[in-house]
Image: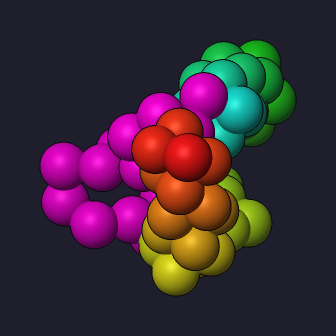
């Protein structure tokens, strides 16, 4: 599974629990669905989208 995120952010941004769960669940699902070794699935979210959502989560946490 390919995640177009910054190095070191393999599961998205900090505190974005829903995205982190989604990534892990999709990775496990891809293990079951892979037909050939080397199959690549591109996760349908960009780093900019993840970061925008992460900033909102941070804003709500800080209050």
Q: Is residue 24 in view?
A: yes
Q: Please state which of residues 56 and 45 is positioned toward the viewer in this rendering.
A: 56
Q: Position of residue 62 (x, y in %)?
A: 46, 44
Q: Please state which of residues 14 and 26 is positioned toward the viewer in this rendering.
A: 14
Q: Is residue 2 left or right of residue 40?
A: left
Residue 26 lies in the magenta-colored region: no
- In the picture shown, does residue 46 fall above or below 54? below
Main SS type for the magenta part? loop
Q: Is residue 29 left or right of residue 55?
A: right
Q: Residue furthest left?
A: 8
The stretch in magenta equals 1-17
Residue 4 lies in the magenta-colored region: yes
- In the picture shown, does residue 2 fall above or below 32? below
Q: Which residue is depicted at the point 39% across and 65% down?
A: 5
Q: How many marks?
A: 0
Q: Residue furthest front?
A: 63
Q: Which residue is depicted at the point 53% across and 56% down?
A: 59
Q: Position of residue 61 (x, y in %)?
A: 53, 39
Q: Is residue 2 in view?
A: no
């Amino acid at each position: 599974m390919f995640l177009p995120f910054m190095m070191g952010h393999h599961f998205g941004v900090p505190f974005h629990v829903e995205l982190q769960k989604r990534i892990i669940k999709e990775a496990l699902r891809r293990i079951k669905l892979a037909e050939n070794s080397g199959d690549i699935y591109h996760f349908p979210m960009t780093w900019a989208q993840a970061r925008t959502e992460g900033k909102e989560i941070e804003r709500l946490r800080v209050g």
